[in-house]
Amino acid sequence: MRNAFAQEMKDQAGMNDKIVLLSGDIGNKLFDSYKENYADRFFNCGVAEANMTSMAAGMALNGLQPVTYTITPFNTSRCYEQIKIDICYHNLPVIVVGVGAGLSYAGLGATHHSFEDIAIMRVLPNMHIMCPCDAVEVKLCLRAALALKKPVYIRLGKKNEPIIHKGEPDLILGKGLIIKEGKTVCLLGCGNILPNVYAAGRTLENLGISTRIVSMHTVKPLDSVLLKEVFSTFEIVCTIEEHSLIGGFGSAVAEWVIDNAVPVKKFYRFGIKDSFTHKSGNQENARKMNQLTPEDIVARIMDNE
């Protein structure tokens, strides 16, 4: 994902001289090509993420379109007040990009895990939240965010995520993308967990259960039209995310269900429970510990089917 982001940043900067990239002490080699072409529009702000955020806000107030980029918890919770007051309060066209979200940096411990970022960004007025599922959606989400010219948080994985889309879909901010059609179960996947969602959907199909798979790349605003159709059509609806069950994508959908008095048949939420992941390991192991593997998803659905 991060390679796709770097390439798209370079491409977009070539078409828009208002774009400025600010990095929080990472991405030096990643952005070499960008810097070769647009050195005057790249700033490595070091381990001073709060200052980086305020710098971006000042640039936006002067007509630029800044994009801040660093590891997810350092670009969200560490500089949360600056995002709230400097960016969102003024409704500025700043894009905050968190790389390595969820369990992507599983082996580095709680300092690098981000189970709370969607939750804290959701409550900020004017903020929009996009969680691309693969490198294709990364590029399309960045384009949509730049076109919006308002505060946007883009939540990225890390690297080597499987490609879900064969081509470039018509991605619209706030509108989910149906990856595969089905009739009985609907799996609403959010972000880089989608390959596991896709694998779970295929297993369910092999077990004779017709399954729709949807990439919900936008958490705020939610696709209310799609959600109305999903809850009125499917016997089982699941939200799946690499984020805390408290305040994340599944919570947003549950709140929408309650607020709109939508009848629910069976609704399951998959995500990180209310606990830290203390054991070290790679992302795959961490997903197993948090019951986010395709096998875990299928087992829960079959147990309650």
Image: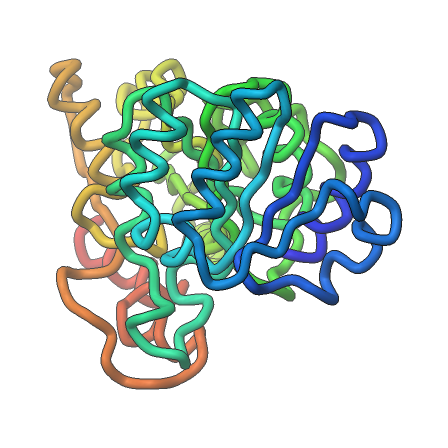
Report if residue 240 is visible in the image.
no
Above or below, 9 against 222 in this view is below
Residue at position x 71%, y 26% in the image: 18
Left or right of 168? Residue 249 is left
Spot the residue most to the right: 37
The residue that appears at 63% across and 59% down in the rendered structure is 162
Provide residue 15's location: percent of width, then percent of height: 83, 27
Q: How is the image coloured?
A: rainbow
User: In the picture, which quadrant includes the N terminus?
Assistant: bottom right
Check the image and report above or below for 273 versus 304.
Answer: below
Is residue 237 visible in the rendered image? The answer is yes
Whether residue 227 is situated above or below residue 167 in the rendered picture: above
User: On the rendered structure, is 152 left or right of 249?
Assistant: right
Number of marks drawn: 0
Q: Position of residue 8 (x, y in %)?
A: 74, 42
- Determine which quarter of the picture holds residue 158: bottom right
Q: Nearer the viewer, residue 249 or 13?
A: 13
Q: Residue at x 41, y 27 (%)?
A: 128
Q: Is residue 215 above or below residue 60?
A: below
Q: Nearer the viewer, residue 99 or 212?
A: 99
**Front-most of residues 113 and 202:** 113
- Residue 84: x and y, percent? 30, 32
Query: Residue 231 versus residue 128: which sits nearer the camera?
Result: 128
Q: Answer with left or right where residue 27 lies relative to residue 197.
A: right
**Quarter location, residue 114:** bottom left
**Where is residue 77 drawn, in percent x and y?**
30, 51
